[in-house]
DNA sequence: TCAAAAGTGTTAATAGTACACCCATGA
DNA sequence: TCATGGGTGTACTATTAACACTTTTGA
């Protein structure tokens, strides 16, 4: 039938960089690798591709397994294919990044899989090439945030402009002028003020916004 | 040793979208698939990853095999992993795009591998998902051309501004105002005028430029 | 009364866009 | 002499960047 038999086959994994936003900081979900090689080391969320599913579907399955979430924003980032990237056996890893709203995250799964959220700016050393993966994801996010409503995936339904600004600052890694930021936001038709006022975050109260 | 044995393995291929610039048109190198499935259909340049090389190295090897070229500009584009994308067997394909100077291309290899250059704007139907791959590559190129000196890879060492403008227009798929284009180029420090004059392309003669 | 976050405009600089004519030359 | 591609400047518009004070209110 095919002329493929002469060619080698490879383990193919998917690693997911799951971003969330909590306490005004951009966070990544990590856990301790449950098996060798690297058992106990910190690792991104990952798994192996199955024969009956597309690579995109693998990523969705893995995300769901670790967060309980379905149909979230998820993008393929890149494929990491160095020969020795996994010290155990040759594994080619296709990396995705996902943006989730931590409020929707199933915290029970956190215990089962020993996952934890860590601040991206204080990321510990992860196994293999996982730190490179996160670095690349951050670069891509910085480029995307200007054009795409990334925030809608990371924030609760209603949010203050201060929180939104903090999110932008976390992703970009820079500080933003408040007036310029608010003007830019007010020009985006996909972000709109609700009449509601949030009294949690300040004495005065701040208008709550939402994504359309 | 590892807990991987329970997981399936996959054929992993690399497909290369090799762009060149000839006759004022952006071109892609294609050939007829030499084996089944899809034998005889038009196809991008590709091959299978080997066990002793990284995926990046596979791409370099395949590029060299079909063009004779080494160390050219090459970027990973994306990985295509639909279950049925290859009607023969499951193959996960990692796609790269390369920019080459057609003048350096080894035309003898063209006969050996039955390759041909085709205009990207008149791309025939290719096998499998190869047309999707090219479409994606074009999108990425359009985004990159504003910031990166893409032209340096596609043009001969010395070139006229008219040729450079034609290249930009091919990549962007739009026409550009000549005066605005020339002003923008003159502000880029990586493109500089040589004193030389090209007398081939016009009666009057045009200044030759080069990338620094 | 004061600390803490919310909210609010103007100006300057830069980048991008639209637009039309003369130049030099070989055939 | 004329057809062909080479070369040039200005005005308008949009976008981005810089910058500081007043408001509200709960503790």
Image: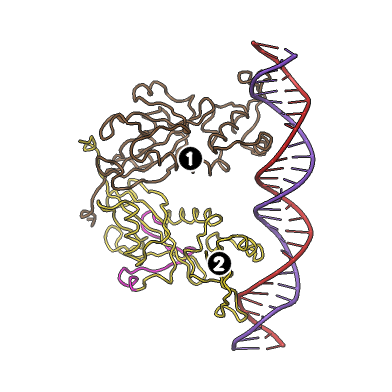
Chain colours: A brown, B yellow, C purple, D red
| Badge 2: residue crowd in 10 Å (few <14, some 14–19, many ≥20) | many
**Is D23 in front, or is A60?**
D23
Q: Is residue A174 covered in magenta?
A: no
Residue of label 1: A138
In this image, B201 relative to B91: left or right? right
Q: CA distance from mark 2 to mark 1?
A: 33 Å
Residue B16 position in % (x across, y down) = 38, 58
Q: Secondary structure at mark 2?
A: helix
Label 2 chain ID:
B
Label 1 chain ID:
A
| Badge 1: residue crowd in 10 Å (few <14, some 14–19, many ≥20) | some
Determine which quarter of the picture holds residue B178.
bottom right
**Number of marks in picture:** 2
- Image mark for residue B164: 2
Residue B96 position in % (x across, y down) = 39, 55
Whether residue B54 is situated above or below residue A110 in the rendered picture: below
Q: Secondary structure at mark 1?
A: helix
Marks 2 & 1, CB-CB < 8 Å contact:
no
Residue A22 position in % (x across, y down) = 51, 26
In this image, A66 relative to A145: left or right? left
Region of the chain picked out in magenta, as a range: B108-130
């Amino acid at each position: 039938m095919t002329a493929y038999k002469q060619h080698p086959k490879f383990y193919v994994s998917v690693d997911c960089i799951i971003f969330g936003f909590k306490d005004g900081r951009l966070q990544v979900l990590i856990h301790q690798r449950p098996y060798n090689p690297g058992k106990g080391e910190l690792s991104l969320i990952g798994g192996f591709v199955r024969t009956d599913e597309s690579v995109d579907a693998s990523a969705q399955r893995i995300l769901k397994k670790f967060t309980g979430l379905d149909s979230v924003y998820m993008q393929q980032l890149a494929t990491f294919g160095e020969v020795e990237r996994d010290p155990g056996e040759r594994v080619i890893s296709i990396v995705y990044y996902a943006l989730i709203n931590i409020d929707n995250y199933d915290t029970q799964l956190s215990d089962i899989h020993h996952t934890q959220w860590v601040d991206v700016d204080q990321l510990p050393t992860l196994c293999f090439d996982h730190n490179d993966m996160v670095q690349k994801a951050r670069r891509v996010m910085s480029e995307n945030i200007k054009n795409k409503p990334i925030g809608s995936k990371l924030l609760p339904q209603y949010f203050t402009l201060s929180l939104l600004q903090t999110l932008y600052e976390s992703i970009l890694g820079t500080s933003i002028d408040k007036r310029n930021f608010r003007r830019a936001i007010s020009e985006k038709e996909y972000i709109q003020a609700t009449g509601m006022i949030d009294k949690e975050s300040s004495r005065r109260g701040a208008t709550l916004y939402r994504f359309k």
